[in-house]
Image: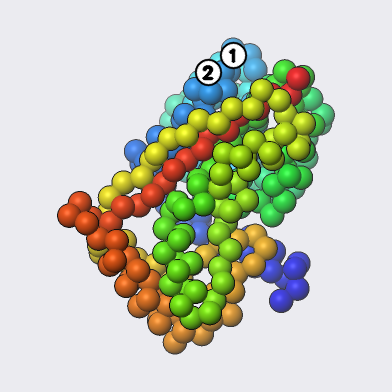
Amino acid sequence: MQNSQYEEQYKKQVIDFFDSRTTYDNDYTIHRALPLLKLVTLQKGQKVLDMATGTGIIAIAAAQIVGSEGKVIGVDFSSGMLAQAQQKIIELGLQNIELIEADAEYINFDNESFDAILCSTAIVYFKDIPAALSKWYRFLKPGGMVGFSCCSEVSCGAPLMIAACAKYGISLTNINERTGTTEKCKNLLEAAGFQDIRVKIQQLGFYRSLEQSREWNGGWFHPQENPLLEVSFEQMAELNTQYSKEVEAQVTEQGVWYENMTFFVTGRKL
């Protein structure tokens, strides 16, 4: 499959996935987003860009901080997510948020337009993370801050999926690999020109039941490659069986641990 064809298919896969999440907001999704705002100190009257805003969890909280003299722009390519965000904005009566349906990876703004740029848990979906960070650096005013969050390489059940597929000679590349350590996060921001880089680590993992943990429909996201797209229905059934075995080996009295070590990363444009 050619790169352009794969990228188009990948983007559609991501959009369809998020469009289907009609009840996205819960304690987990909210609590893994809002810590960014504690690290990127916003002020009244500032202009904020929320990339891959989803249902607007970060954008709405930021809008309430910057007030009527400030402005927040939220960008996302999922119309379903944006519809949920818009409904919340209407209910709250907020007038200082603009939602744009577009691919956050490729949208452009004028240089030095924003005081802060945020991206909660979505930067790993970008095909070219260094290019995105370089653009964000350009979009920021001098003294402006960037903040993004991501998960460690061993989070979100990825190791078990990778292990199950390896038993059948299928090599999966972890979507969290590019940002999966604190050192990698720091290096990415340094390469884009940011300084005063800080990483806060928070464990957001929890136990799930065996039944919940077994659930895997063969979905796998990676912006460069996904060998599972070429797997037959019969092969996928075998992979699911193997995945269940991998999960069962992790069972404890409390259930199956769902690792979610999260990095909250900030940097400043001096």
Chain-order first, disc 1 or disc 2: 1
Colour scheme of the picture: rainbow
For the residues marked 1 and 2, what is the alpha-carbon distance in whole angstroms?
7 Å
Which disc is residue 150 wearing? none
Kindly give the residue lying farthest to the left in the view shown.
253
Secondary element at tag 1: loop
Left or right placement of residue 104 versus residue 152 in this view: right
x and y percent of residue 224 in the render?
67, 63
Nearer to us in this view, 83 or 221: 221
Kindly give the residue lying farthest to the right in the view shown.
111
x and y percent of residue 230 in the render?
58, 80
Image quarter of the N terminus: bottom right
x and y percent of residue 191 in the render?
76, 37
* Number of residues whose C-alpha sits closer than 10 Å to that of mark 1, classed few (under 14), some (14–19) or many (20 or more): few
Which disc is residue 43 wearing? 1
Residue at image position (63%, 51%) is 178
Residue at image position (56%, 72%) is 171
Residue 222 vertical position relative to residue 85 in the rendered view, above or below: below
Amino acid residing under circle 1 = Gln
Secondary element at tag 2: helix
Nearer to us in this view, 10 or 79: 10
Whether residue 87 is visible here, answered yes or no, is no
Nearer to us in this view, 88 or 5: 5
Pointers 1 and 2 in contact (CB under 8 A)?
A: yes
Residue 61 vertical position relative to residue 224 in the rendered view, above or below: above
Image quarter of the C terminus: top right
Task: Tell me where residue 187 sits by quadrant.
Answer: top right
Q: Which residue is mark 2?
A: 65
x and y percent of residue 92 in the render?
45, 27
Residue at image position (64%, 46%) is 101
